[in-house]
């Protein structure tokens, strides 16, 4: 858990500095374009001035004025084409660098948001006092970071090899268990994923497995994500997330990173519940043992 907290609390990438560098790069590109235009105009002015000076000083043989004008025009055209080619080459390279930098900034920004969400969700899970509250905290935390419209968290019972609904988010039904009752084909799919321990993503699954319900009606999900929660070879539960829009890669990465934290918190809470149950059984047995001699003495 310490490793997870350390990774989550790592400092975000310097997205602001990258944005400043991109702005400066755009300004440099604009200045370069104007300098190329000025260079072209300077060459044109230089050619015209040289030709006019040669004509005024009679430095050219008679009848060579048209040839000089043609050479000047050719030189201006050549310099214009050279400047244009140089500008296009530089602009192409700069635009490619800009595209790569913007993609890096978007990735850095997404990574920063994901880390912040991981820190917040980790702190929220560590405050849960029961397995049911832990499942609710997980779904509500994911809903704040992902386009989640319906979710279900189930715990795995190793003894019966079955799933027990622990919490829901935005799902129709009186309680968590009713979600699986109202969607009869969803249960076997969840059980299959739990046994295979492989996450699946269904795009446009249709109404066969579930429909997303709200106060305005219901609709078919655009994407259905089912992800097992396991840690150190042990299966703890399963997450079913549905959305009216694609989740993207961020959802899978966030679930993979929060799964170990969730599993360790659940293991601690389940151990505490088992210890409390065992202590209660010991107290009941001790009370019965103490009352048994008194009952026997009263009968005698």
Image (cartoon, rainbow, N blue to C red):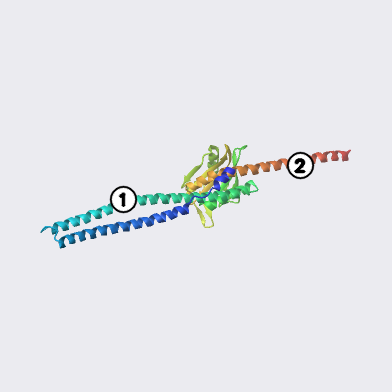
* Number of numbered discs visible in the structure rendering: 2
Residue 177 lies left or right of residue 293; in this view the side is left
Q: Secondary structure at mark 2?
A: helix
Relative to 153, say whether 67 is above or below: below
The span from disc 2 to disc 1 (Cα, nearest Å) is 84 Å
Mark 2, residue position: 283
Q: Quadrant of the C terminus?
A: top right
238 sits to left or right of 34: right
Labels 2, 1: front one: 1
Q: Is residue 104 visible?
A: yes
Q: Position of residue 149 (x, y in %)?
A: 52, 52
Please state, as top left, top right, bottom left or bottom right, where the N terminus lies in the image. Answer: top right
**Residue drawn 74% across and 40% down?**
281
Direction left: furthest residue: 62
- Mark 1 lies on residue: 89
Q: Is residue 183 something that shows in the picture?
A: no
Residue 84 point in image, percent of width and height = 28, 54
Do the numbered discs 2 and 1 sit on residues whose CB atoms are within 8 Å? Answer: no
Q: From the top left corner, tell me how far across and down residue 143 is, in percent.
A: 54, 52
Q: Residue at x 46, y 49 (%)?
A: 107
- Position of 90 compared to 234: left or right? left
Q: Is residue 26 left or right of residue 39?
A: right
Residue at 29% x, 59% y is: 38
Q: Secondary structure at mark 1?
A: helix
């Amino acid at each position: 858990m310490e490793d997870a907290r350390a990774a989550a609390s790592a400092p975000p990438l310097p997205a602001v500095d990258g944005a400043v560098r991109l702005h400066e790069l755009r300004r440099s590109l604009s200045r370069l374009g104007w300098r190329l235009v000025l260079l072209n105009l300077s060459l044109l002015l230089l050619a015209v001035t040289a030709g006019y000076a040669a004509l005024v000083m009679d430095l050219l043989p008679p009848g060579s004025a048209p040839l000089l004008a043609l050479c000047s025009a050719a030189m201006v055209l050549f310099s214009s084409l050279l400047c244009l080619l140089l500008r296009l080459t530089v602009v192409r390279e700069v635009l490619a660098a800009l595209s790569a930098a913007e993609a890096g900034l978007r990735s850095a920004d997404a990574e920063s948001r994901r880390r912040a969400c991981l820190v917040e969700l980790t702190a929220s899970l560590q405050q849960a006092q029961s397995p049911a509250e832990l499942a609710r905290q997980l779904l509500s935390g994911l809903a704040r970071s992902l386009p989640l419209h319906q979710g279900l968290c189930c715990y795995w019972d190793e003894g019966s090899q079955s799933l027990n609904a622990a919490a829901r988010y935005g799902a129709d039904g009186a309680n968590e268990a009713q979600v699986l009752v109202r969607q009869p084909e969803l249960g076997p799919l969840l059980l299959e994923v739990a046994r295979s321990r492989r996450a699946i993503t269904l795009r446009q699954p249709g109404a066969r497995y579930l429909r997303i319900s709200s106060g305005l009606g219901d609709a078919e999900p655009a994407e259905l994500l089912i992800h097992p929660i396991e840690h150190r070879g042990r299966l703890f539960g399963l997450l079913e997330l549905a959305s009216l829009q694609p989740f993207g890669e961020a959802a899978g990465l966030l679930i993979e990173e929060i799964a170990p934290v969730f599993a360790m918190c659940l293991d601690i809470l389940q151990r505490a519940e088992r210890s409390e149950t065992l202590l209660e059984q010991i107290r009941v047995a001790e009370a019965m043992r103490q009352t048994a001699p008194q009952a026997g003495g009263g009968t005698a």
